[in-house]
Image: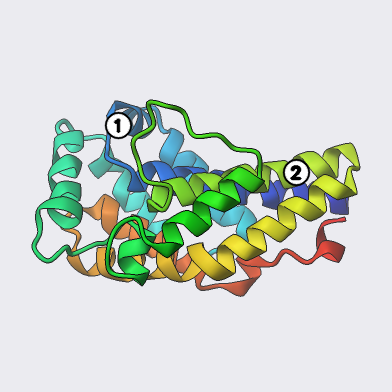
Amino acid sequence: MNETEIKLKRLAARTFLYQILAQSLNYPDESLAQSFSSGYYINNVADALEVLGIGGLQSELADLKKDLQKPGILLELEKDYTRMCFSSKPRLVYLFESVYKEGKLYDESTFQIARMYYDAGLKVEEDFRLPPDHIAVELEFMSFLSFKQMEGIRSGDKKITDYAIDLQKTALDKHVRDFALSIAERMEKHADTGFYRFTAKLMKAYFSNPANLELERNEML
């Protein structure tokens, strides 16, 4: 495997982790439960951890496998998610960056991240109901940018690669990293289910290690 292939493999692992974390932090649904029963979640998270060199979570992930495939797991997750993120007063886990930063929904950070989506050429579907600063939306955005970076490398288009890197750096520094770590800290403390405790630890392990977020141009080109 040559240097470019190694870089692309690491980028693919990052893209996947952003995507699976986004799904994990959205309201739990049948597609999430299906990813458990099919083995998609366990197998691909394990692969991503190995590719990125993230240690300390493998045994916990293996222990989680049986728990995620038991009957009624989706209802269990729905209850835990609702308790932490919606019904608790005050909220145990804040999923919106504006609440984390400014203390209320639809404040300055909401419109800042929305502007970034617009600048990247993304349009929100009319039936899409989540605010743009929901952590799941921000992580989907990071997954999209990481994928665009891969596209740029594969096609040899430096303009696409540089732009994807610039947007990722801005999003991480100004919006995603500190917000994600705050969610991870709160979720690890308050979650009743093994899945959400693992999600919190996975976010903490990924976002707290600068090596996982390194986006220097000379590394990727």
User: What label does residue 33 carry, if any?
Assistant: 1
Looking at marks 2 and 1 on the same chain, the residue that comes earlier in the sequence is marked by 1
Residue beneath label 2, please?
A: 150
| 85 left or right of 54 in image | left
Q: Residue at x 59, y 52 (%)?
A: 116
- Asked which quadrant contains residue 126, the reply is top left
Image coordinates of residue 8 in percent, x first then y, are: 76, 47
Relative to the observer, which residue lies in front, 43 or 207? 207
Q: Amino acid at mark 2?
A: Met
Q: What is the distance, in whole Å, between disc 2 and disc 1 at their CAs? A: 29 Å
Q: Residue at x 71, y 47 (%)?
A: 9
Callout 1 crowding tier (Cα within 10 Å): few <14, some 14–19, many ≥20: some
Q: Against 3, is 40 above or below?
A: above
Q: Against 211, is 84 above or below?
A: above
Image coordinates of residue 84 in percent, x first then y, are: 17, 57
Q: Amino acid at mark 1?
A: Ala
Q: Quadrant of the C terminus?
A: bottom right
Residue 57 visible in the picture: no
Image coordinates of residue 41 in percent, x first then y, are: 42, 39
| 73 left or right of 24 in image | left
| 5 left or right of 31 in image | right
Helix or strand or loop: what does disc 2 sit on?
helix
| 194 left or right of 173 in image | left
Q: Against 173, is 164 above or below?
A: above
Residue contact at pointers 2 and 1, CB within 8 angstroms:
no
Image coordinates of residue 199 in percent, x first then y, are: 35, 55
